[in-house]
Image (cartoon, grey):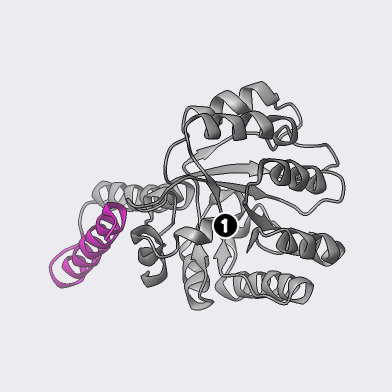
Amino acid sequence: MPLARLILYATSAAGVALAVRAVAVEPPPVWVAAVALGAYLAMLILGVMFSRFSMFADVVTHGGDDARGVALTFDDGPDPKSTPQILDRLDDAGAKATFFVIGHKVTAHPELTAEIAARGHALGIHSYAHDRLFSLRLPWQVKRDLERALDAVENATGERPSLFRAPIGLISPAMAGVARDLGLVTVGWTARGFDGWSGAKPEVVVRTVGRRLGDGAIVLLHDAAERGDFVPASVEALPAIVEAAVRQNLPLVRVDEWLGTEAAEAARAS
């Protein structure tokens, strides 16, 4: 069990014990209760913000010990201008990747979504609306959104995805529970290129990603802008990233090729 989850359980048990003592014996001083509550809320917020600690869900952030190669992943598509450029560059390199698509963009461009799959890449969902406040939504709202995203991809490709990446990487208890109920494996990242904003420089993306390449690394890039119509820096950076992986003898693989590894098995069992 992840350390962060053990801490969550321990502090939750301590909170219950404090409440029982307050009822059965005497309430603690106000400052003690305030500090305890504040610390607990801060811990929960950190658990949402830093999903790699797997406080609420077992998040796959790296391949298992036996994983070979690097998994390039692309968020926020599909986009008819930039996604085909990414696909062409991957084809040129003979590389496969994983695309975490936004449901409403899939609905708008089903043929492009189908093309991603037809070219041999894996598809996962990145929610339907990419709501920046998604981690604050109630379970029924989260379920409705994720089911819409799953349906959109299935309608476009005939296959229902099993991979999920949370918008902005924030994972709440509600999101963790819904994803588990839907049979989704939640995927994070080992390295990110910070390429998804309009001012990103391709050479900086290459340097940032290159420092974290290694067997089992999951790299977060973007094949489309979350909002707006600019082309992400990953389009220009991708050939150099591929070259860096080749120099290190690291094949470029799909995330789902590692689903039999220890990390992914833990995610399925969460």
Q: Residue at x 80, y 42 (%)?
A: 85
Q: Amino acid at mark 1?
A: Arg
Residue 92 horizontal/vertical position (percent)? 72, 41
- Between residue 140 and residue 220, name the one nearer to us: 220
Relative vertical location of residue 164 with respect to residue 23 in this rendering, above or below: above
Relative vertical location of residue 192 with respect to residue 45 in this rendering, above or below: above
Count of all numbered marks drawn on residues in the image: 1
The main secondary structure of the magenta stretch is helix
Residue 204 colored in magenta in the image: no
Q: Secondary structure at mark 1?
A: loop
Q: Which image quadrant for residue 259?
A: bottom left
Q: Which residues are magenta?
A: 1-27
Residue 2 colored in magenta in the image: yes
Relative vertical location of residue 29 with respect to residue 265 in this rendering, above or below: above
Q: Residue at x 40, y 53 (%)?
A: 44
Q: Quadrant of the C terminus?
A: bottom left
List the single residue furthest toward the left: 25
- Between residue 154 and residue 254, name the one nearer to us: 254
Q: Which image quadrant for residue 202?
A: top right
Horizontal side of 63 relative to 74 (left or right) equals left
Residue 174 horizontal/vertical position (percent)? 50, 68
Horizontal side of 233 relative to 28 (left or right) equals right
Q: Quadrant of the N terminus?
A: bottom left
Q: Which residue is mark 1?
A: 165
Residue 23 horizontal/vertical position (percent)? 20, 71
Relative vertical location of residue 186 with respect to residue 34 in this rendering, above or below: below
- Between residue 139 and residue 98, name the one nearer to us: 98
